[in-house]
Image (tube, rainbow, N blue to C red):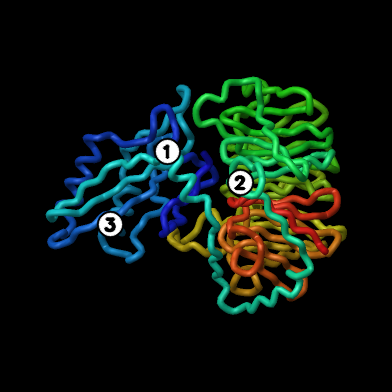
Amino acid sequence: MNAQNLFPVKLDNCRTDKFCLDCGDTKAGYQEKEFLKLQEKLNDELKLDGIKGAIMFQVLVNSKGRACVLSHTDQSKNFITQKLIKELNRFKNWTPAITNGKIEEKSSINIIFKVDNNKITGQIERVDKKAFEKSFDKPNSPEIYNENYIYKNENLSNYEITVWNSKNSNLPNNWNDHISIDKNGLIWLTVNQGLVTFDGSEFKNAEQNITDKGKYFAYYELATDNNNVKWVYAKNNIYSYDNDKWVKYDSTQIGINSAYNIVNNPQTGELFFCSKNGITILKDGKWSKIDKNLYKDLPGNRVAFAKRDSKNRIWIGTYDGTAMIDENNHVTNFEKSSTVLKGKCITSMDEDENGNLYFTLYEFDRKNKKQVNNDEGIAIRDVDGNFKQFTTENSGMPFNHSNCVLYDKNEKVLWISTDRAGLVRYDLNDGWENYHTENSEIPTSYISTMTFDNNGDLYLATRQGLVKIKRK
């Protein structure tokens, strides 16, 4: 299961590009003997006289046995909680999750610490998956961090919003993170651990049928190429579906067994697989690669996003910085620049008819690891090469972390999805609008990603079902 922060107090001190929730045939844990030593240390150093209570922590454990705290339940900023966070992050004796003999790259576990009788004790509390899904199958209230902008939302009444969820349709699950619309107008949607299609009236199972799903099978990325072939990353394998049969690709032949993102480039017919190994490219049946071995000036190999623009330049967002490879194969590393892209990883991109580029930003090396509303937002690069960043400080962005940006060619506006503040409409002048659960029919403030259909209608993949936004 794709996971997220479970508890009310969310910390932004971990790299959480992808992780699973308490998964594995062998689940993540710790070396008991060393954890007992940590408990002894805590009891020696903390003054617990007269204190009684419990705190739950969500801890992200990586493949190397290191960990960091993702979220917790204590909203009081108690000194004990701060001490526990520090010690859990320092603890080096974690054991990673293992599935089918392979170590999971990242998985989260829950640890509860209880204070009673002047003593603190801790232990893992395993996640009840069904109870977890039920608890999260509800709308997320908006978290608006912009205290200055007044949203009039004058255009909201111009749209018809339609929602399909597990209550009003046969959608099997409301947890929708990825969406693609193929050349026939058929919608493909990931649903928690499954994959479905939607023809406008009925959802149908569309999962691969050539390998045994086994435990913890899930679909993590989804795209449609120029030939109407669907591509997915699912449980350590890349798959394709040509509307007749599924194919699983041998990682020894294509060079990857996973992807952070799959991006189609309609103008060139290239498919970009963005992964921890750089960019793997498929074009005309041939596989190639872009990484630091070929381009020394790239900031890193862990590529979150990549896409070509109309001038044949490749824009690349890595977890070590953003770069651009121009039509002459010259690399611009923005970590060496003074632009707003320095310190940022681009996570999505779109382009208008004039060649202006629009990016969503991720601040990968934040100074304040506990801060939620970071130096991110969106960036616009005009045709003259000038960049401008838009955040809660200088615009109508309601929250700075955004998942996807799309340019609407019909209305000449930007649509921006966020995971805390709902949907943003920006008219590219001074007009910002923010649609969410408390002012519209959009069912949640967590919008994963978006796409347009052939009619220009906007579809949202959300954590509360599928949403269509159609201009009246």
Q: Which residue is mark 3?
A: 83
Mark 2 vs mark 3, CA separation in Å: 42 Å
Q: Earlier in the sequence, mark 3 or mark 1?
A: 1
* In this view, the mark in front (2 or 3): 2
Instruction: Indicate left or right for 76 with 351 as reference.
Output: left
Image location (x, y in percent) of residue 194:
61, 35
Mark 3 vs mark 1, CA separation in Å: 24 Å
Front residue of 323/27: it is 27
Mark 2 vs mark 1, CA separation in Å: 25 Å
- Residue at 16 percent of width and 54 percent of height: 116
Q: Earlier in the sequence, mark 2 or mark 1?
A: 1
* In this view, the mark in front (2 or 1): 2
Image location (x, y in percent) of residue 292:
63, 38
Q: Earlier in the sequence, mark 2 or mark 3?
A: 3
* Secondary element at tag 1: loop
Q: Is residue 373 above or below residue 26?
A: below
- Residue at 16 percent of width and 59 percent of height: 48
Q: Which residue is mark 1?
A: 22
